Image (cartoon, helix red, strand yellow):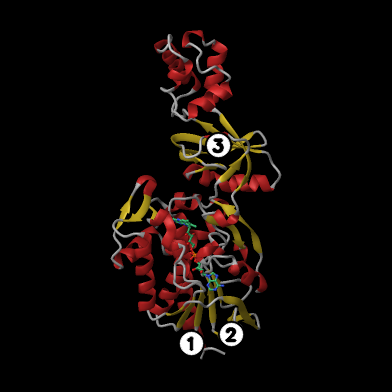
Amino acid sequence: MGEASYLIVVGAGPAGLIAAGTAARYGIPTLLLEKMDRPGRKLRITGKGRCNLTNQTDVRDFISHFGKNGAFLYQSFSRFFVSDLVQFLEGLGIKIVVERGGRIFPAELDAVQVTERVSGWTIKQGVQLETHRAVKEILVHGGRAAGVALQDGTQIPAKAVIVASGGASYTGTGSSGDGYRMAERAGHTIIPIRPALVPLKTAGRTAADLQGLTLKNVRASVIVDGKKTASEFGEMLFTHFGLSGPIILTLSGRVVDALRNGSRVQITIDLKPALDEQKLDNRLLREINAHHKQQFSTMLKELLPASLIPVCVEQNVIPAEKICAEITAKERHRLLVWLKDFRFEVVGSLPLEAAIITAGGVALNEIDPRSMQSKLVAGLYFAGEVLDVNADTGGYNLQAAFSTGWMAGMAIVQQFKTDQEKR
Ligand SMILES: Cc1cc2nc3c(=O)[nH]c(=O)nc-3n(C[C@H](O)[C@H](O)[C@H](O)COP(=O)(O)OP(=O)(O)OC[C@H]3O[C@@H](n4cnc5c(N)ncnc54)[C@H](O)[C@@H]3O)c2cc1C
């Protein structure tokens, strides 16, 4: 048996760091076990190294980014939300800046420095952080959490355990899905895990031909069995296997779920979302008139990035060298439809490993949203991505990790007080 702590936190990501620090701050003997060599390996690579910490928006809008499971977060957001996180970070000397779409970033520091500050704070609160300590199992005695068993067989007793072991993607950061297995063994239901915020694979070679091309200000929509189900406006990217970039990642969760259901899924890109069909037709007429003695491909330079021109020519079956004056009304209409509906057949996604976030996880109906405590095992808590909550990009996921971690830490403070009063 190892040394006794009141609380053991499993995983030193953002959720575990704030949970452990919050408990220790109120004098609770806390052991934070991290299986990697250092805390916050995933946090260090967030936001392309810049760390999109949270988002400046109201709670309703914030929660809407989590889809139907977002309601679970109301309780934690009502106690620890954007302004609380910003205040906490500013207290660590992390100045913030609000960027496009309300995204909040550190103003001067990068993700690695943010991780150092947050983990430094955790240790300063008195948390005992031990790295290279992989937890295998939660010990449960008489329906109560009693500690943890490590991979190496060591058992460490405790009165409370917070599982903050993250999701199951980017496994090199340490988040390899252990928490789901631990929760399941403790009796919890795991909603099947699957990739979300993940690039999509498409049929044919069109995406590969366009590899490296970024499109800004376009609208991408998901078509499931012929019906448009969701759409996003913004930036996307073509890769050698298919589609990626912010709006594709945002739509990817729905795509993955629809493919799992056996549906046919397509992505359609509106290349001219600011123009309705009539306005676009007027624009095409103007371009055709202005270029009437020139070739079709020359006119397309006014409408499309260079690498899209051969694709447009091929898919519209209008010869590149055709003189604009000779373009028929039928051909113009075909071009118009293509510009509004540049379509891709989705055949899959990159694997879970490549996902920014894991969808699915510990079933929320088995967790008390006011404390993050398990309804099945007293003294067992969950925080962060291991729970069945996930949002699109924009800083929402980190806020959820910090908020649920803080909430679990505060709930332990309450449990500790109650335990002491009983003595
Ligand atoms: C490339 C990338 C970029 C991202 N950028 C952003 C962004 O800018 N903004 C945003 O909001 N979200 C972003 N995310 C998502 C965000 O990083 C996660 O949602 C967040 O890190 C989840 O926090 P967590 O504490 O729950 O889990 P994690 O950060 O995954 O931390 C879990 C910790 O638990 C440890 N652990 C796992 N199993 C065990 C075990 N058995 N024993 C001991 N320790 C264990 C892991 O090693 C890890 O340190 C990004 C994700 C990726 C992959």
Where is 159 relative to 291, above or below? below
> Circle 1 is placed at which residue position?
421
| Residue at 42% across, 62% down | 44
| Residue at 38% across, 60% down | 111
| Residue at 58% across, 24% down | 315
Relative placement, left or right, of 259 versus 55 is right
> Is residue 16 something that shows in the picture?
yes
Q: Which mark is residue 129?
A: none
Comparing 241 with 376, the one in front is 241
For discs 3 and 2, the disc positioned in front in the rendered view? 3
Category of crowding for the residue at label 3, using alpha-carbon neighbours closer than 10 angstroms: few (below 14), some (14–19), many (at least 20): many
Category of crowding for the residue at label 2, using alpha-carbon neighbours closer than 10 angstroms: few (below 14), some (14–19), many (at least 20): some
Where is 380 relative to 204, above or below? below
Query: Amino acid type of disc 1?
Result: Glu
Element carrying mark 3: helix
> Circle 3 is placed at which residue position?
207
Query: Amino acid type of disc 2?
Result: Thr
Q: In the rendering, at what x and y percent does residue 121 appear?
A: 35, 73
Task: Tell which circle, 3 or 2, labels the residue nearer the N-terminal end.
Answer: 2
Q: In the rendering, at what x and y percent does residue 113 appear?
A: 34, 64
Comparing 145 with 76, the one in front is 145
Is the residue under label 2 in contact with that under label 3 (CB below 8 Å)? no
Element carrying mark 2: loop
For discs 1 and 3, the disc positioned in front in the rendered view? 3
Is the residue under label 2 in contact with that under label 1 (CB below 8 Å)? no
Q: In the rendering, at what x and y percent does residue 151 appear?
A: 60, 78
- Image quarter (top left, top right, bottom left or bottom right) of the N terminus: bottom right
> Circle 2 is placed at which residue position?
154
